Amino acid sequence: MAGQFQAPKGVPDYFPPRSNSFLAVQNAIGHAATLAGYGYVELPVFEDVNLFVRGIGESTDVVSKEMYVFEDRGGRTLALRPEGTAGVARLVIEHGLDKGQLPVKLWYQGPFFRAERPQQGRYRQLQQVGIEAIGAPDPALDVEVISVADDAFRSLGLRNFNLMLTSLGCANCRPEYKEKLIAYLEKLDLDEETKTRGKLNPLRVLDDKRPEVQKLLDKAPLMINELCDACANYHREVEDLLEATDVKFTPAPKLVRGLDYYTRTTFEFDHPGLGAQSGIGGGGRYDGLMSSLGGNDLSGIGFGIGTDRTLMACEAENLIVGEKSLIDVFIVPIGDRAHQLAVSLLQQIRAANLRADMAYGDRGLKGAMKAADKSGAQIAVVIGDEEVSNSRVQIKNLGDSSQVQVALGDMVAHLIQVIRQTEQS
Ligand code: HAM
């Protein structure tokens, strides 16, 4: 029966067993960040709307069309966070984290909000795990950030993803390039909407997916060919280091990101198994962001990996990610005394770090055994009145149906042994 309420449009729910895989993906990315020395930050889910307007850029779709903006009871205008980089920069400035050791390396995870048109893989509440490294303009750091993403994907078993890489230049070379591109676009026979977009944000026109527009853009000037010497050298070093660390990439001179803060190294990971929304992660340098938010003039680089889409990529590659079952041991108590005993046995088993559950309610042996099977547990511990009197339990292996009786005092050791054996086999 359908209930009265549904999740808001474009907002996915995660529940078992798929939520296990979701958590495993999130943990794998977080683990890769932790291995590289990134510390965890828990960011606010909403911030002053101007942080995003200033940080991400007023003309971006994310800010101009997709933010959830609201007024709180004190008349402050707030927005649900559409992304994490601006929030991290704000946090670093507010708490003076940049006054200590540099770079400041932080990671975060959780939901972000964009009022996009929902479709497969494009949500209004999307999940990301991100990292940011602030305060060191060093190509080795760019390569570290890219490698953490690459390591995270590989640790999940993913193989069929691509890394697209380019440089978007800096405050010295980009303005000149932009002028060149605007002049080029003005000469083209583009529709009015695209022309307007070209005036607001000419780089975004390069990303137009329509083949007829791409044809017109064939000879468009490209940032990568117009970099100043400093940016060109920097980019060469990034590419050389990536080659040395065996991270494969494809030069993508027309790569454009939907956020305005990017400078120099800019990248995106995509997965061909996902259809139209193929971006599983993206990021880059943002060397002007800190100062534009009133902080010290420090460089920064980071990525945001889409947790939802990374999970979809794992599914596209038929990878089993995370535990399939929630439970190792399921207790089947028959009768009141067994029921009471089961409660304390559960505690003992869980204290040994095994996942344990029991048949709650009055189900009878048949119903309780069915519940044990359904639980996905490897082992059922069956206790009846007789077992309670003898201080013994029946241990049934639900895989091969073999059964042994063990003394209550030996139960936990026995369970650990059986679980270990199955893990190894
Ligand atoms: P972004 O490219 O906007 O970058 O988002 C990063 C990733 O989040 C995307 O590659 C995609 O996997 C996922 N994502 C974005 N929008 C959606 C959506 N509507 N539904 C599902 N998944 C989505 C950023 O947010 C930057 N803050 C990344 C960054 C960090 N750059 C530097 N540091």
Image: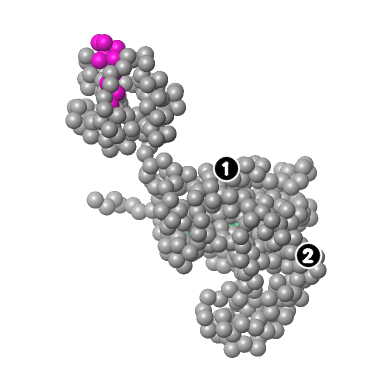
Work out whether residue 84 can be spotted. Answer: no
Callout 2–callout 1 Cβ contact below 8 Å = no
- How many residues crowd around disc 1 within 10 Å: few (fewer than 14), some, or many (20 or more)? some
Q: In the image, 55: left or right of 385?
A: right
Residue 45 pos. (x, y %): 56, 49
Depth order, front residue of 362/37:
37
Marks 2/1: CA–CA distance: 32 Å
Q: Which residue is mark 1?
A: 31
Q: Quadrant of residue 246?
A: bottom right
Q: Which residue is mark 2?
A: 233
Q: Amino acid at mark 2?
A: Asn
Q: Is residue 383 above or below residue 378?
A: above
Q: In the image, 137: left or right of 69?
A: right
Residue 369 pos. (x, y %): 23, 31
Q: Is residue 329 above or below residue 54?
A: above
Q: Is residue 353 magenta?
A: no
Q: Is residue 394 magenta?
A: yes
Label 1 secondary element: helix
Q: In the image, 330: left or right of 109?
A: left
Which mark is drawn over residue 378?
Answer: none
Query: Which corner quadrant holds the C terminus?
Result: top left
Label 2 secondary element: helix
Magenta range:
387-396
Q: Nearer the viewer, mark 2 or mark 1?
A: 2
